[in-house]
Image (cartoon, grey):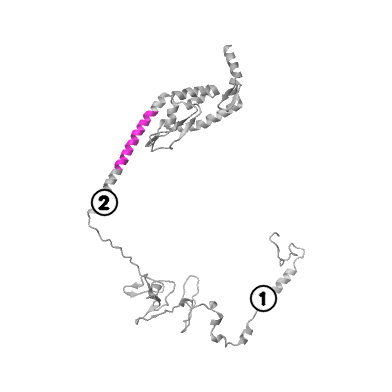
Amino acid sequence: MADGNAEDGAKGQFLFCIICRINHDQGRKHIYSRKHRTLLSQILIKFGKKVDEARKFLKKPSVEDGELEPGSRFWCHFCSENVNKHVTDREVTIKYGGLFEHFASENHSKNLHKYWWENGADKNLKEKFLINKEKFNSYKEEVNKKLQEFEAAMEQKRLKAVSQIKHRELLQAHTSQQPPEIQVTPEVVYKTVQNEQGILQNPTGWHEGQRVWGGGIVKYRPGSNQWFPWNMDSIDKGSKGSPLSNGVVTKTRFQTAEAFGENLTCIGIPELKEGEGNIHTGATPPWLRDDNDDDDDDDNKDSSTTSDVVIGPSYDAFKKHVEKMKKINHKNPQRVGANFDRKRETSDDW
């Protein structure tokens, strides 16, 4: 009867539920409500996933170089406090060492049992959030082995780095004692090739002391022994041209002789007369000349020749147009779009 009176007295008091975050006066009946059990299940499932991920390292501890996730902590729902997630001294980190140490503590065990009784959690899930002393002692032994292996590997790495530094110092000391050597830039040798027309080509413009074609888009005329200069060959004292033996610089005239390619017909170009030029010589194209620059011979042309020029479409084109209009007129006048006026301007909103 005493227990029943105590339970009735607790029922009349207001209590705060940390799961539901509400004050209630239902006593122990509150932990059996649907809302409370749903929220409790969500907390245990969510926290349980993190614990399951960490417990993988309980049998096989992981030792990391340096500080892993600086300042990382986790919230223990049973103790209501933030706890360090890893154990580190900023040089070596034991992964999830802080979590295992907390789960093995007596304070965590007491708070866990209290949390389970106050909130009515499933007893089968309690062992997941606890680590007994035997498992924790075995874990610490494995951690010591991992730390020794890690320290041995770091020592080997340090000795290797020291050996490399000493080797570099000896090499630098040996090099500093040697007399300075004159470094000669290796000469670039250009290969002389022969094109389809049998003309020797070399980027330098010379082959065995003889002047050869240096390359470019202008081709030699087959059988010709002359060479067309590049810009670098035609520059002499700031003037463009081809230097002669007497020192007089004259402008070189050149033209395209032939062009070759797949599916192309070779069209011969007549030689230019004295005083004539083309686009290759830098002359102004006819379509860019002013009307005042026309030759005088144009003024002497017979004006009657202009009357012979046919203006407008030919007779055959006119007949085709008439036939086309006949076909259009024979179409069904009731067809879609027959009355649409295509000459009428329409707005953008049409």
- Residue 259 vs residue 190, the one in the foreground: 190
Quadrant placement of the C terminus: bottom right
| Magenta span contains residue 155 | yes
Residue visible at 55% across and 79% down in the picture: 290
Mark 1 packing: few (<14 Cα in 10 Å), some, or many (20+)? Answer: few
Hey, what amino acid is under mark 1?
Ala
**Residue 314 lies in quadrant:** bottom right
> In the rendered view, would you say 298 is above or below 71?
below
Q: Which residue is mark 2?
A: 172
Marks 2/1: CA–CA distance: 90 Å
x then y, percent, for residue 274: 46, 84
Residue visible at 50% across and 25% down in the picture: 126
- Residue 271 vs residue 73, the one in the foreground: 73
Main secondary structure along the magenta-highlighted residues: helix
Range of the magenta residues?
Answer: 139-160
- Residue 225 seen anywhere in this rendered image of the structure: no
Residue 317 tag number: 1
x then y, percent, for residue 284: 50, 77
Q: Earlier in the sequence, mark 2 or mark 1?
A: 2
x then y, percent, for residue 234: 39, 75
Residue visible at 69% across and 76% down in the picture: 319
SS of the residue under disc 2: helix
SS of the residue under disc 1: helix
Classify residue 155 as left or right of residue 260. Answer: left
Hey, what amino acid is under mark 2?
Gln
